[in-house]
Image (spheres, rainbow, N blue to C red):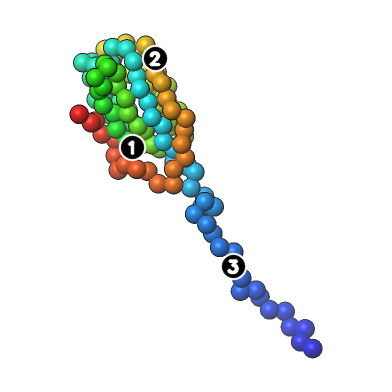
Amino acid sequence: MNNKITKSKFTPAVTPLAAPNAASIFRCMFEVFGKVQGVFFRKHTNKKAQQLGLVGWCMNTHEGTVKGVMEGTLENIIEMKDWLQHKGSPRSVIQKAVFSPHEPLVIPSFEKFSIRR
């Protein structure tokens, strides 16, 4: 009888969902209402998003709003949501901002934040 103890060669598999950063990126869509066109709102939104390290886009709509998508850490998305609701560009007058629920992502869909025309 062999009483020799051997090490197990079994190593548990790591699935993508178990990766430590798998849920650290989120997506949120937004639309901002009020005086947000003709007041450099998209330019300031782009600048703020880049400062926060967010990726995505924003654009004017035919309805006079600005809508877009932002992706990044939950902390930075929350800060951007506050900025979109309460600050905006210096000449803007924000009536309201509407946001989609935060959607977890494995990887971002965009390389940078941009203004769509």
Say few, some or many: other residues with alpha carbon within 10 Å of mark 3 (under 14 / 14 to 19 / 20 or more).
Answer: few
Residue 8, how many percent across, how many down? 65, 74
Say few, some or many: other residues with alpha carbon within 10 Å of mark 2 (under 14 / 14 to 19 / 20 or more).
Answer: few
Q: In which quadrant is the C terminus drawn? A: top left
* In-front residue for pair 17/75: 17
Q: Give residue 105's quadrant in the image.
A: top left
Name which residue lies at 32% across and 25% down. 67
How far apart are labels 1 and 3 at the CA level? 37 Å
Residue highlighted by disc 3 = 11
Q: Is residue 24 left or right of residue 109?
A: right
Residue 68, compared with residue 10, is above or below; it is above
Q: Give residue 45's quadrant in the image.
A: top left
Work out whether mark 1 precedes mark 2 in sequence or the reverse, and give the earlier one.
Answer: 1
* Residue 40 appears in the figure: yes
Residue 62, how many percent across, how many down? 24, 19
Name which residue lies at 61% across and 70% down. 10
From this viewpoint, which residue is outermost toward the bottom? 1
Amino acid type of the residue tagged 3 in the rendering: Thr
* In-front residue for pair 91/29: 29
Residue highlighted by disc 2 = 96
Residue 89, how many percent across, how many down? 29, 18
Residue highlighted by disc 1 = 55
Is label 2 in contact with label 3 (beta carbons under 8 Å)? Answer: no
Residue 5, compared with residue 111, is above or below; it is below
Q: Secondary structure at mark 1?
A: strand
* In-front residue for pair 106/49: 106
